[in-house]
Image (cartoon, rainbow, N blue to C red):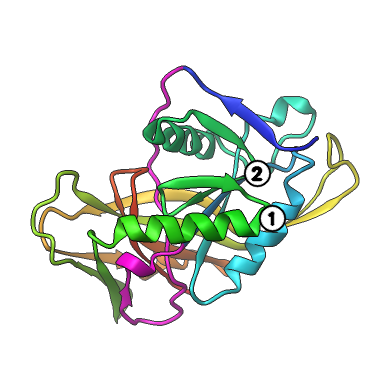
Amino acid sequence: MLLRRFFFSLFALPLITGFVFTTITSATAAETGSEVKVVELFTSQGCSSCPPADALLESYVNRQDVVALSYSVDYWDYLGWRDTFGSAANSERQRAYAKRRGDRAVYTPQAVVNGLAHANGAQKIAISKKIKQTQADLKQLPVQLSYSKDGDTLVVTANSPVERWAEPPVLWLVHVKDVGRVQVKRGENLGKTLEYHNVVLGVEKIATMNGAQLQAKVARDKVFPRRGEHGVFLVQLGSTGPILAALEAK
């Protein structure tokens, strides 16, 4: 099976999600805007064309200038293998992106770049082109995102020269599993052991940015709930609009 493509003509529900920019492993500020590089991969354990995209995503996860996230969808489960990381929320997020873009393109493996454009998730050159193209669109919406530690709490701060927003940015916390390995026993990837990185477990809304600054407190246990998991903070217009800034806490 080559590229799997779906076109949804019905409405798609917007998701509580968002995505990310530069990998930050300490409490430092991250300037975004023209430097935002967020790659969200929509993948499936039941898709034979997805493993190359999953491997490519790992290379982005290991880069210091990109934030990469893996979303497993559930709409291929009927083919014989239920994706162990898949969820309806991930599928709806992907459809909501397509609805917002207006192209109805929903397929696996699909990479959504900076919340604005999409490309085949296994094609590095195509993804690089989308990163450059979308960075130009984000220059007019610069946001600086940082956090500091205060005991068992993380204080997250977002600043921007923009004081009035047509659509208020939202601060999201994306819950991520560092690495996940799965032995597939049925379906198109029968017999394969697949490895996933920065696997999205869920997304939580933290606060809305109504002016030029936002500050929110988040319990450390929520960002680091257990060993092998961490959180990603991101600022995004709405739930599936352009991604303006992000911080990955490890």
Disc 1 vs disc 2: Cβ atoms closer than 8 Å? yes
The tally of labels here is: 2
Q: Position of residue 126 (x, y in %)?
A: 59, 54
Q: Residue at x 24, y 66 (%)?
A: 143
Position of 106 relative to 123 (above/below): above
Residue 180 visible somewhere in the drawing? no
Position of 220 relative to 87 (above/below): below
Q: Residue at x 69, y 40 (%)?
A: 83
Boundaries of the magenta span: 10-37
Position of 157 relative to 235 (above/below): below
Which label sits on residue 108?
none
Residue situated in front as seen by the camera: 134 or 227: 134
Compared across the picture, whether 87 is left or right of 191 comes to: left
Compared across the picture, whether 189 is left or right of 207 comes to: right
Which corner quadrant of the image does residue 163 belong to? Answer: bottom left
Q: Position of residue 178 (x, y in %)?
A: 60, 65
**Could you tell which of marks 1 and 2 lies nearer the N-terminus?**
1
Q: Amino acid at mark 2?
A: Pro
Disc 2 crowd rating (10 Å Cα; few below 14, some 14-19, many 20+) is: many
| Residue that label 1 marks | 54
Q: Amino acid at mark 1?
A: Asp
| Residue that label 2 marks | 109
